[in-house]
Amino acid sequence: MRVCIVSEGCYPYTVGGVSGWIHSMVQSFQNLEFVLVNIVSSREQRGKFAYELPGHVTEVHEVYLQDADWGRKRWRQTSRLKLKGRERQALRSLMLGRQVEWDGLFGLFGEKHFSIDALLMGEDFFRIAVEVYEERYAQIMFSDFLWTLRSMYVPLFLVLRQRLPKADVYHCVATGYAGVIGSMAKHAFGSSLLLSEHGIYTREREEELIRATWLDGLFKDIWIEQFRKMSRLAYERADVVTSLYPAARQLQIDLGCPEGKARVTPNGIDTARLEGLPGKGPEEQGVVNVGAVLRVTQIKDVKTLLRAFAAAKAAVPSLRLWVMGSMAEEPEYAGECIALAEALGIPAESFTGDINIREYLGRMDFTILTSISEGQPLAVLESFAAGKPVIATDVGDCRGLIYGEGRDSLGAAGILTHIMNQEEIAAAIAELALHPEEREAMGKRGKQRVKAVHELSDMRRTYRELYQGFAERMGLTWTEQPFEIGEVR
């Protein structure tokens, strides 16, 4: 069976989180042929992989969201495109925000050859934009509205015109642009579509847009509605939709996913890999090590972490911070974090870059995650597997992981705090630093919790059932033999 994994901005370009999950999935099913469709921002990322791909990954396709040369200067050369009645109606349905005629759009971009410039700068697009403006947005300046629409539709139209590899199953690891690609493929090839969300894509984009400084007022609403349209498409077309925990499943349903398609499939990790880790060396006795296993990016809110740690260290001088993870994804932000750390008296060597977690995690007394958005963080699961308690912000499934609400009665395996609350996070750091017996008890509870629900073998079993179920429904032969290039299945 040929499975196409569609992802945006992660595997195989960055490590950890969703990327690590995808890599684990690929490694878990060596009996399947995998093809990757990777959505990235621009051609600058082409082929810059952080993972060595296994041999049963036979193709890699890249889709660039910033890959068009268009603008006012080309209007005269690109304004001659004329749409037919049903094509214009499909475009109108997208722009007016009513029931989108996605099949019509798939046909338009799949059957006709034209430049995106020609569409965006053409008469049809302009006239529909005027209609939308007069109906809904006449209180803002039309030129700003028109150029907002054009910039918003560039990445979507680039995705819609992609020629996709054929596969039996398309496994999209988000809604958004990835979900559009999966829905296009199902329309074109009649394939099965599996959608797995770690964070809820629509909600994450909403949060980003609300915080954005490059958009004002109604323009944010226009962008948010477009992401909602794409997510509804993916939910409607998918055969099965998975989420990591019950609250995420309910949010998917609230956003338009049919309840019968939605199921919970928790993250899983290899807990045995994190047994018997090396502990502190003699030089670290008396030091309280605080570990943050994360990518140094804005969504992890490392700056709040640094300020909270500095405040806690003023009260507990024995504290030492370790920020463990890639600094390459947002280099400008990483540089700002290093500068802030130095200003706060936190040494630059606290930032380790990419590490082998087995070499560090056993030395930590507890770990911390100050993200402003998460799904079901692997960093928390790995910390628990190593017997380490966690301080985490109240995002994604962190509350359920730390307190076991609705799952078990083991008790707290760490401390939950509010997002960006420096004082509260500092108090939590000091609390765990000053109470070693409490730390140890919390670490034991976390280890019990992760072993009960989040073993990698359980996750593999769940997805094996899903993949095998697709194969049976499509009349494909399922075999456990490793896939080899040249085979036809």
Image (cartoon, grey):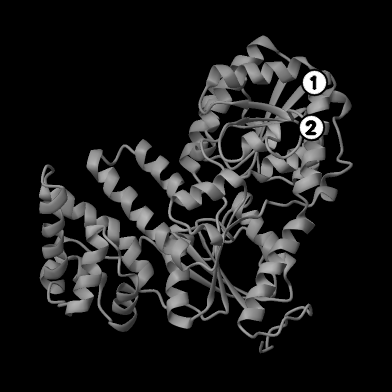
Residue beneath the point at 82% across and 39% down: 448
x and y percentages locating residue 456 in the rendered image:
76, 55
**Residue 170 appears at what percent x and percent y?**
54, 71
Mark carried by residue 438: 1
Above or below: residue 117 compared with residue 203: below
Residue under the image location 34 percent in, 80 percent down = 110
Residue 175 in sight here: yes
Check disc 1 and give the amino acid type. Glu
Q: Secondary structure at mark 1?
A: helix
Q: Answer left or right for 355 relative to 34.
A: right
> x, y percentage for residue 210?
35, 38
Q: Residues within 10 Å of mark 2 (few under 14, many from 20)?
A: some
Characterize the local packing of mark 1: few (<14), some (14-19) or many (20 or more) Cα atoms within 10 angstroms: some
In the image, farthest residue toward the top: 315
Q: Please say if 82 is above or below 176.
A: below
Residue located 27% across and 49% down the image = 222
In the rendered view of the protein, which quadrant contains the N terminus?
bottom right
Q: Residue furthest front?
A: 260
Q: Nearer the viewer, mark 1 or mark 2?
A: 2
Q: How many marks?
A: 2
Residue 370, above or below 258: above
The reply, left or right, for residue 486 in relation to residue 180 is: right
Q: Helix, strand or loop at disc 2?
A: loop
Q: Which residue is nearer to you in this view: 55 or 344? A: 55
At 63% from the left and 45% from the top, the residue drawn is: 376
Residue 244 horizontal/vertical position (percent): 62, 50
Query: Badge 2 is on which residue?
Result: 410
Kind of residue at disc 2? Leu
